[in-house]
Image (cartoon, grey):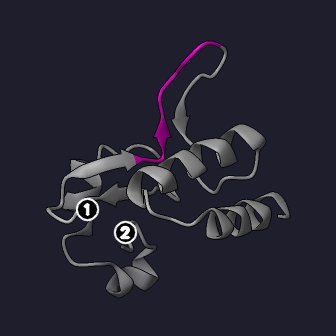
Amino acid sequence: MIVKETPKNKELETPGGDKWLKTMKGDSAGLPFYGFLDKNGKVLITSIRPAKGENKGGNIGHPMKDEEIAYFMKMVKKAAPRLSSRDEATLLKKLKSQ
């Protein structure tokens, strides 16, 4: 979904995207923001990592740091529990190679 485009590119936005962004509580999270839904449109998990210990939480955006990549992989596993270990390893390798 494309949201929050510049005035010049406003026509590229997804119709209703702002509503979904708000539904997923990502309207003040910054971009990029990710949210995975189940087949009924229920939010499973978003890129807003809960605060825990020294982790201050917040939107992971594009995952670059180890802890962001770990959380993104948690998101993927929740949204695609049948993802093969081979595909999971490929994705993880790609994220870490950035």
Q: Residue at x 63, y 22 (%)?
A: 55
Position of residue 81 in the picture relative to residue 21 (left or right): right
Q: Which mark is residue 18?
A: 1
Q: Residue at x 81, y 57 (%)?
A: 96
Whole-percent x and y of residue 82? 44, 62
Magenta range: 46-53
User: In this rendering, would 16 be left or right of 70?
Assistant: left
The residue under the point 29% across, 56% down is 21
Find the residue positioned furthest to the left.
40
From this view, report whether residue 63 is shown above or below residue 40.
above
Tell me: residue 91, above or below residue 27: below
Q: Amino acid at mark 2?
A: Val
Q: Position of residue 79 (x, y in %)?
A: 39, 57
Is 50 magenta? The answer is yes
Q: Which mark is residue 78?
A: none
Q: Are marks 2 and 1 in contact (CB under 8 Å)?
A: yes
SS type, badge 2 = loop
For the residue marked with disc 1, what is the amino acid?
Asp
Within 10 Å of disc 1 (Cα), the crowding (few <14, some 14-19, many 20+) is some
Q: Residues within 10 Å of mark 2 (few under 14, many from 20)?
A: many
List the residue tagged with mark 2. 3
Coordinates of residue 98 in the picture (x, y in percent): 83, 64
